[in-house]
Amino acid sequence: MPAEWELSDDLPDEDVLMVEIIPPWKMYFDGASHKEGAGAGVVFVTSKGELVINQLLGLYEVKKSELLSYHNYAKRLMGWLGDVELEHLPRRDNKQADALAKLASILSMTDKEARIPICKSWIIPPIFSDDKDDTFQEEENHVMEVFETEEEDWWQPLVDYLKYGKLPSDPRRRIDIRRRATRFIYYKGTLYRRSFEGIFLRCLSDDEKDQAMEEAHSGVCGAHQSGPMLHFRIKRMGYYWPAMVKDCIDYAKRCQACQFHANLIHQPPEPLHPTVASWHFDAWGLDVVGPMTKSSGGHLYILAATDYFSKWVEAVPLKEVKKENVVDFIRTNIIYSYGVSRNFSMYYIAANGLAEAFNKTLFSLLKKVVAKSKRDWHERIREALWACRTTVRTPTQSTPYALVYGVEAVLPLEHQIPSLRIAIQEGLTEEENARLRLEELEALDEKRLEAQQRLECYQARLSKAFNKKVRPRSFQVGDLVLAVRRPIIITHRTGNKFLSKWDGPYVAQEAYTNGAYKLVVEDDLRIGPINGKFLKRYYA
């Protein structure tokens, strides 16, 4: 049949057995474009969406006169928008238009007032009349009354069932409502839930539960309690909603006052990474003790250094802590005497435990040997150092003096009351003494290797005990965190009692593999690196 021939419904000499009637297509505006608003928002609803697309593209002709007004206005909208691309979507990908089509089947545009409950949307009447005029004509809109309804509260199906015997259409929800309704009662317009103690708890809506949590947590009688305690408090007051525990925990952890004034977190976030020194004088731990009682020489501090392998110690009194004094100590007492070390530890108590342990031992010794005036401690430091160097240390099962020089130091008591070692050495000739000394030096490396094995076993036991307390806590780049208020000395109290313990919030800019992080504030001021032990997550 030629394309230019017109189709005719007249079928002469034929018996029509069946006639398929295709429903007519319709076009609605979704409310985003009308005479008092701007923008484009035309939604086409039709049984043959491809037909509408072809008509707008000019491939098909619009034959129905009542559709010309919509067709012309759609063409005008396309002209306003500029570059427009039309594409036919199947029904499964065009759910919004399908929903509008179902709504249109219910809605009848009559003179009577229509009440349509909707959720966060708008319904407007057609902006075109039934006039057969092809030109676009503006006319006064007949606005319908629209009611906006919020999402249904959790207790509404229970109320419908207890009050009216109404159940949801979903079979699963019907069973769930019947099962849960046995513990609820509806009394004088209020829903109550019977607890296991036999107490009736009032059921709260979403708005009421927010008010209850705010008042119970930070209100007039609020105690800023933790989430579980907040849940217990609200339940004790006689209220209930399904997700009480979860909501209370989430509300409490987002409280700004609770976050900034929370206690410090003492659980380590990372497993212990012990510093393993491969050889003597390879790594030193430095620390400053003080301020102390001012000595007769005007000293207030003690600068101490401890070798991680042999536990050898060096210490000097200082009048003031300056970088020049520290540099001079490292050069004179360490480099000139024992060579250049590979690294020194920074100040961090948990990572510099060896230096902290020696500080405790040194201070304990000085307290017991100083005079009553407590001002001669700077003269007693060398005696305390000698005592530490000649004492057997638990990690190595040897004295620091023996690991450094290969032989145990001869103490004054051994000369006053000769020991077996002194008695044997007194019977040796000078040549035999020299040979014995060479043998001791030859065995020194073996003795150090044995000490290293004992040290590794000792550190493994420490790590096992430490890692039992680990509570993993890590952050990703871009996370908001709070940091312990500077200076980070958790054993000292800084500021007044009303000062917050945490600063921030900061943004984690970079994460290192050893549990340290680099932070940045809003003005791009960088802070760090800082150990993750002093950080916690911030909830906005």
Image (cartoon, helix red, strand yellow):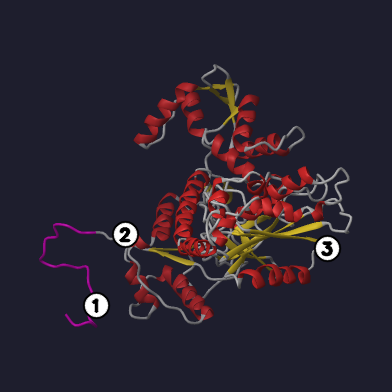
Q: Amino acid at mark 2?
A: Pro
Q: Residue at x 47, y 73 (%)?
A: 74
What's the amino acid at mark 1? Glu
Residue 250 rendering spot, x and y as whole percentages: 59, 43
Q: Quadrant of residue 263?
A: top right
Q: Which residue is mark 3?
A: 320
Q: Give SS at disc 1.
A: loop
Count residues near mark 1 (Cα–Cα under 10 Å), then give few for <14, some for 14-19, many for 20+: few
Distance between mark 1 and mark 3 Cα atoms: 108 Å
Report the residue at 77% width, 34% height from top: 220
Which is more toward the observer, 434 or 318?
434
- State the extent of the magenta-drawn residues as a range: 1-20
Q: Tell me residue 399's x, y (percent).
A: 57, 52
Q: Nearer the viewer, mark 3 or mark 2?
A: 3
Whether residue 536 is visible, yes or no, is: no
- Please determine whether, in this image, residue 49 is positioned above or below residue 166: below
Q: Are marks 3 and 2 in contact (CB under 8 Å)?
A: no
Q: Is residue 261 left or right of residue 378?
A: left
Q: Is residue 458 above or below residue 13?
A: above
Q: Can you tell which quarter of the image residue 305 is in?
A: bottom right
Q: Main secondary structure of the magenta part?
A: loop
Left/right placement of residue 387 relative to residue 476 reads: right
Element assignment for label 3: loop
Give the Cα separation between the discs numbered 1 and 2: 21 Å
Check whether the beta carbons of the residues at disc 1 and disc 2 lie within 8 A of each other.
no
Mark seen at residue 6: 1
Q: Which mark is residue 23?
A: 2
Q: Secondary structure at mark 2?
A: loop
Q: Residue furthest top?
A: 198
Circle nearer the N terminus (1, 2): 1
68 or 439, which lies in front? 439
The kind of residue tagged 3 is: Glu
